[in-house]
Image (spheres, grey):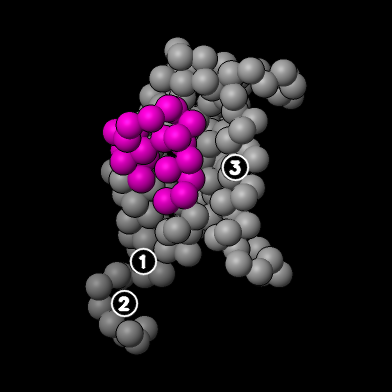
Amino acid sequence: MGIGTLYRRYASREALLAALTHRSFQRVLEAARLAADSDGTAVDALRSFIDQTIDHGAELVLPLHGGPVPLDPGTQALRTEVHATIEQILSRGRQDGSVRPDVFAFDIVLFGALLAQPLPQVPDWKLMARRQAGIYLDGLAGTASTPLPRRKLRARSVQTQMERLGP
């Protein structure tokens, strides 16, 4: 596809990136919903979400990967729903004791973002990313004893910091 074809549909580079960001949040929300609706433990659901994030990572244009911070209300609503859906999974795990109480949706979102983009010098990235996910998810167990550095990361404060950086 040529550059002319892209710009016939999108008025500017910024409009194209905004559309790609919106599509990416739709994809991540779909993964979160599938995970939330799955049978099994909360950790199994989170594993499903992370696996889908790894599978689709190359297709995602998101702020934590250097994409534009969403400014339009529709994309912001998608982002909010992603966090809320992941929080529902975590809440389920907190209630049955399978997930430690000091883990929040932004922790999962950040970890997914870290694994979505391959490191260039790591062979068989998807396999290695899933290995790291296994180690991480085991650390979410309700029986984990190492305290986390902060009581709670607030997604809103991270969003505010990202908005200061600009698109």
Q: Earlier in the sequence, mark 1 or mark 2?
A: 2
Look at mark 1 in the image and give the residue it sits on.
16
Name the residue at 45% across, 12% down. 95
Residue type, label 1:
Leu
- Please tell me how crowded label 3 is: few (under 14), some (14-19), or many (20+) other residues with Cα within 10 Å: some
Q: Residue at x 60, y 67 (%)?
A: 124
Disc 3 on helix, strand or loop? helix
Q: Which mark is residue 7?
A: 2
Residue sitting nearer the eye, 100 or 82 = 100
Magenta span includes 32? yes
Q: Which residue is mark 3?
A: 134
Please say if 162 is above or below 99.
below
* 42 lies above or below 127: above
Look at the image and tell me in which quarter the N terminus lies.
Answer: bottom left
Q: What amino acid is labelled 3 in the image?
A: Gly
Stretch in magenta: 31-52
Q: Residue at x 52, y 20 (%)?
A: 98
Comes first in the chain, label 2 or label 3: 2
Q: CA distance from mark 1 to mark 3?
A: 35 Å
